[in-house]
Amino acid sequence: MTGKIEKIALTPKTHTTPPAKFSHGVKKGNILQVAGQVGFLPAEEGKPPTPAGPTLREQTLQTLDNIKAILEEGGASWDDVMMIRVYLTDVAHFAEMNDLYNAYFEAQHLTAPPAARTTVYVGLPAGLLIEIDALAVLG
């Protein structure tokens, strides 16, 4: 007889409570799904989320750091990530995002092959230029 595997919500100290009924990340067994993250600065008690800045660079790097915090909260790293989905608001941002993405992951010194990735174009709330989610498999 096997026991039921518990699903655990992941909310690092750097994140505020989500604005709707979802988790920033969930882990069940060795699967960890990170919800779409945006470039908000780390949470400050009693203050609403604040964007890292108006530029694609600021928002992309903060978004990746926000994902990394959730991965670490669940005992994972970028090496465990199998799939990354990037949501951009402007097709013209693709080349810059790709350069930032490549530089970011070069600095992470991955020991496993990089994750698969899909990039799509979407509408996001005013001022937000990018959203990214990730799926990790541990062990």
Image (cartoon, rainbow, N blue to C red):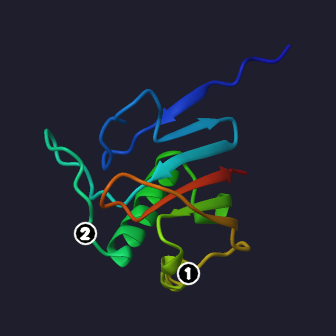
* Quarter of the figure with residue 2: top right
Instruction: Report which quarter residue 129 is drawn in.
Output: bottom left
- Residue 106 screen position, x and y as percent: 56, 84
User: Where does the image place residue 95, in percent across and percent down from the top left?
Assistant: 54, 85
Residue 90: image x %, image y %?
Answer: 48, 71
Classify 56 as above or below 120. Answer: below
SS type, badge 1: helix
**Residue 53 tag number:** 2
Q: Which residue is mark 1?
A: 98
Q: Nearer the viewer, residue 129 or 104?
A: 129
**Is 82 left or right of 23, judged from the image as shown?**
right
Query: Mark 1 and mark 2: span between their CA atoms?
Result: 19 Å
Q: Is residue 56 left or right of residue 139?
A: left
Residue at image location 40% in from the left, 72% down from the top: 61
81 or 23, which lies in front? 23
Residue 55's label in the rendered image is: none
